[in-house]
Image (cartoon, grey):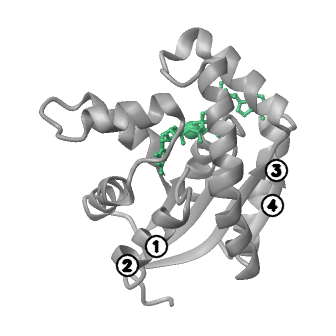
Amino acid sequence: DSASLYNVVFVLGGPGAGKGTQCEKINEVFKFKHLSAGELLRQERQTTGSEYGELIAKHIKDGTIVPVEITCSLLKREMENSQVRNFLIDGFPRNKDNLDGWNSAMKEVADVKRVLFFSCPDQVCVDRCLSRGATSNRTDDNADTLKKRLTTYKESTMPIVESFRTLNLISEIDASGSPEQVFAEVQKVFTDLGY
Ligand code: UP5
Ligand code: MG
């Protein structure tokens, strides 16, 4: 409800659908703070002394999903250390474990206003990640891991998208156009929400 401490918009879609790109644009215009779950995990993996570094590295390389206790605590820490109330949570929740963990830790304090779902053909997703792979230094931007990321997305993340659809929370956006074309549709969603 409106008394919640935090307002959250989840941002979902396949690997390379453009979640991060669109979240940066949303942040500029609507001042929602962008939290990429994948980026927080990559940072934690690099953190000296983290007891989770190796586990995270293995999941990212295999295109599988890190246990929710780790991801959710990173998100919660960022939210608590921020001075703002409105957050874009990019790339989470990705499976039922993630959603259940979020609900038990955050349901009381965070109101999920909307779930943006970027739909994009597999081949477009793969091509975007492979071309980024030339410069990204990401251990998962290669053909082998991309196959696994797509499989995980279909088997584990799509059921979560469908459960949000049942709750009438999904705004589905065609993510195959240019960043500007996609953002024009994204803007309508935020305007309709009253932002
Ligand atoms: N690009 C973007 N938009 C474009 C457009 N409209 N037209 C043409 N090009 C476009 O974009 C990807 C590339 O495409 C960029 O080069 C961009 O310039 C270009 P980006 O905006 O980065 O897309 P995004 O959807 O954010 O792609 P990303 O690769 O980040 O998505 P993933 O969901 O695969 O990656 P994420 O970082 O979220 O997760 C990585 C891994 O972390 C997961 O596989 C998993 O192992 C782990 N993870 C968890 O375990 N739990 C979590 O909760 C989150 C992640
Ligand atoms: Mg991203």
Question: Cβ–Cβ below 8 Å for labels 1 and 2?
Answer: yes
Q: Which residue is mark 4?
A: 172
Question: Cβ–Cβ below 8 Å for labels 4 and 2?
Answer: no
Q: Compare marks 4 and 1 and give the one earlier in the sequence.
A: 1
In the picture, measured across the screen, residue 103 lies left or right of residue 48, that is right
Circle 4 or circle 1, nearest the eye: 1
Question: Cβ–Cβ below 8 Å for labels 2 and 3?
Answer: no
Q: Compare marks 3 and 4 and give the one earlier in the sequence.
A: 4
In the picture, measured across the screen, residue 11 lies left or right of residue 162, that is left
Name the spot of residue 141 as percent of width and height, x first: 59, 22
Question: Cβ–Cβ below 8 Å for labels 4 and 1?
Answer: no
Name the residue: 68% across, 41% down.
151
Q: Tell me the distance, in whole angstroms, between the alpha carbons under discs 2 and 3.
A: 34 Å
**Three-letter residue code for mark 2:** Ser
* Count of numbered tags: 4
The residue tagged with tag 4: helix, strand or loop?
Answer: strand
Name the residue: 47% across, 64% down.
97
Estimate how packed mark 4 is, as few (under 14), some (14 to 19) or many (20 or more) residues with alpha carbons within 10 Å: some
Q: Which residue is mark 1?
A: 100
**Three-letter residue code for mark 3:** Ala
